[in-house]
Amino acid sequence: MLSLYEAAHLRIHREYVLEEALAFTTANLNSLAMKSSPNLANQIANALDQPLNKCPPRLAARTYVSFYEEEESINETLLKFAKLDFNRLQMLYKQEISQIARFWEENKFSSELPYARERYVEAYTWINSLFYEPCYTKWRIILTKMVVLVSILDDSFDACGTPQKLQCLIDALKRWEMSALDELEDYTKVICKAVLVVFDEIAEEAVKEGRSYSVPFAKDALIELVNNYQAEVEWYHDGHVPNFEEYMSVAMKTSTFDLFITISFIGMGEVTGTEPFEWLRNAPKIMKATNAIGRLMNDMTSHKFEQLRKHVSSSVECYMKQHNLLEERMLKDFEKLLEDAWKDINEECMRPTAIPRDMFIRPFNFARISYLCYKHGNGYTHPEYLKDDIRALFVDPMLI
C-alpha cells in the first residue's frame, strides 16, 4: 500500500504528465489544423475555442450542422430536417424575446433605473441555454424576467444606495406583499414592485401545474441572494477585503445560479415533490462546481471594470492580496481551480443521479453558458463578446 506521501507524489506527477500531454495535444491539433482541409481545420479550431462539452446545446447543434453540410457524404433529407428544426425553434425564440422586450419597456426600466444595464437579450441567452426545449417557452420568459430583475438588483447594490436603504429593500421583499412598497421610495420601490409581480406570476403558474409547494424554495433563494449582495456592500463600506475563502463563501451565492435553477425546477414536469429542491438547497457537488465556474470566470474578466465603480474586492483582488501574487500567477492558479471544477462536473455527470436526469443537467448547462459568455471577456456587461453567438442563435436562420 502506498504511503500518503507517495500517493500525493504520484498524484502530482500524474497531473504534471496530463498537463504536458494536453499542451502537446493542443500544439499538435493546431499544427494539424494548418495542414488539413478547410472544413476539418475549422472543426479543429472550433473544438479548441469552444469544446463540445462546454457549448450550450442549441449553439452546438447549429455549429455541427454547419460542419456536417460541408462533408463529402451527407444525408440531404436529414440535413434539411435539422435546418428546419433549428429555424422553427429560432422563430419561437424570437417571439419570446419580443415579450421580454415588452416587459422591459412596460416597466420603464431605462428611465426609472438609468444606471441598470439593458441586457434582456443576453439574459434570455443564458436562460435559453439553461433549457431550450419548446415545452419550456412559458418558463423561459418568466425566468428571463427574473434574470433581468436580478441584474438590476446587482447593479443597484453595486452602483448606488447605502446599506441602510438597501436593507429596507430586503426587508420589503421578505414581506412578499404589495403593501411593503409604501415603506420604499425612489428606485427601490420600482425594483420591489417588479420582483413581486414576477413572483406572483411564478406562483400562479406553479399552482396551475400542481407545484405550489415549490414556490417558498424560490423565495428563500432570492432572499439568500440579496442578503449576500448586502454582505458585499457592507464589506465595501467598511473597507474590508476578505480572504479568498471568506469571499467565495458569499460570492458563490451571488453567482445567482441557485435562484435560477430553483425556479427552473418549478417549471419542469419531472418535479414530483420537494426532493429536487432539498437536493439543491444542500449544495450538491455539481452546483458548487457550476457556481465556482460562473464566479471565477466572471471575476477574471470583469474585476477591472468593477473596481471603476463602488464594488467590493473580487476573488481576483482577494486571492492576490492573500497570497501576495502578481496577476499572471493568479490567473494560472484560477485556471487550475476552473479545471478542477470542470472535472467535478464531468465526474458527477457519470454517476447515478439523486434527481431526474433531465433536471440534473441544468446546472451543467449554466456552466456551459458561463464558459461561452466569459471565455474572451465579460459577454454580459460587454455584449460584443456574445454578438456573433446571439446572431447565430436568434437572428440568422439556416439557409435551406
Image (cartoon, helix red, strand yellow):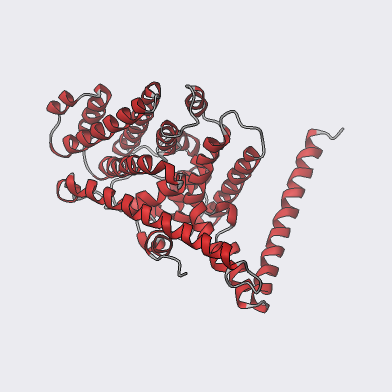
Residue 186: x %, y % from top left:
13, 38
Q: Is residue 20 left or right of residue 179?
A: right
Residue 372: x %, y % from top left:
48, 55
Q: Is residue 275 above or below residue 165?
A: above
Q: Is residue 77 left or right of residue 304?
A: right
Residue at image location 55% in from the left, 31% down from the top: 284
Using the rendered image of the protein, determine whether residue 240 is visible from the camera's viewpoint. yes
Residue at image location 59% in from the left, 46% down from the top: 342
Q: Is residue 8 left or right of residue 231?
A: right
Q: Is residue 355 above or below residue 190?
A: above
Residue at image location 24% in from the left, 22% down from the top: 175
Res. 187 image quadrant: top left
Res. 349 image quadrant: top right
Tell me the quarter of the image containing the N terminus.
Answer: top right
Res. 67 image quadrant: bottom right
Viewer-proximal residue, 167 or 314? Answer: 167
Q: Is residue 395 left or right of residue 132?
A: left
Residue 88: x %, y % from top left:
42, 57
Viewer-proximal residue, 340 or 248? Answer: 340
Viewer-proximal residue, 9 or 292? Answer: 292
Residue at image location 22% in from the left, 43% down from the top: 160
Residue 242: x %, y % from top left:
43, 37
Q: Residue furthest front?
A: 77
Numbered circles on residues, count: 0
Viewer-proximal residue, 213 or 376? Answer: 213
Using the rendered image of the protein, determine whether residue 117 is visible from the camera's viewpoint. no
